[in-house]
Amino acid sequence: MAKKSLQLGRAVEWPHTPEEAQLDRVPNPQKGTDYLVRFTVPEFTSLCPVTGQPDFAHLMIDYAPGQWLLESKSLKLYIASFRNHGAFHEDCTVMIGKRIASEIKPKWLRIGGYWYPRGGIPIDVFWQTGRVPKGLWVPEQGVAPYRGRG
């Protein structure tokens, strides 16, 4: 399938599934410099594949761009496509990380999925592409472990 033009700057349909969502990339004007880009997704939702009940997470996506930057509008549309997608926490988190890495081919990428409790147990999922580039400043993701009411 041929890649469509950028979704930025025009009205587009909301994708119904992650598979049909288009992730866009744009040239990195600082490709000779190592730096970190962070996307914070504090209200991610998907569905439990067994019960159909909603699951909620706080996602942190960090990457060191290479030749490409991830275009943020397309990320928003991709993330929203999970709203009616049934998958376990681990699958959602790793699927998102792998898809982004495949599309933009960063020097390094990590995703932290901080999921709210299901059945009384919070599940946190972490995935990365490899080693952090030498000298790259990578701040902590800053998402506290789930504490409930305590």
Image (cartoon, rainbow, N blue to C red):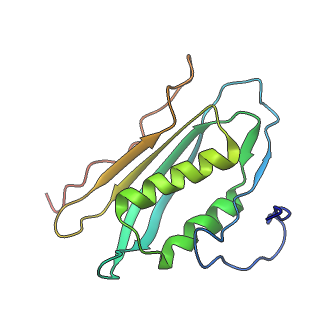
Identify the residue at image location x=44%, y=55%: 93
- Residue sticking out furthest to the top: 135
Please give left or right for residue 28 compared with residue 127 in the image: right
Please give left or right for residue 3 compared with residue 131 in the image: right
Q: Position of residue 122 (x, y in %)?
A: 24, 59
Please give left or right for residue 39 compared with residue 3 in the image: left
Where 30 sits versus 96, above or below? above
Q: Position of residue 137 (x, y in %)?
A: 53, 25
Q: How many marks?
A: 0
- Residue sticking out furthest to the left: 150
Q: State the quadrant of the C terminus.
A: bottom left
Identify the residue at image location x=77%, y=76%: 12
Where 40 sits versus 108, above or below? below
Q: Position of residue 65 (x, y in %)?
A: 68, 36
Examine the image and state in which quarter residue 104 appears. Answer: top right
- Quick one: 95 or 81, which is closer to the camera? 95
Where 96 sits versus 15, above or below? above
Q: State the quadrant of the N terminus.
A: bottom right
Where 135 sits versus 144, above or below? above
Identify the residue at image location x=80%, y=77%: 11
- Quick one: 42 or 91, which is closer to the camera? 91
Please give left or right for residue 58 compared with residue 71 in the image: left
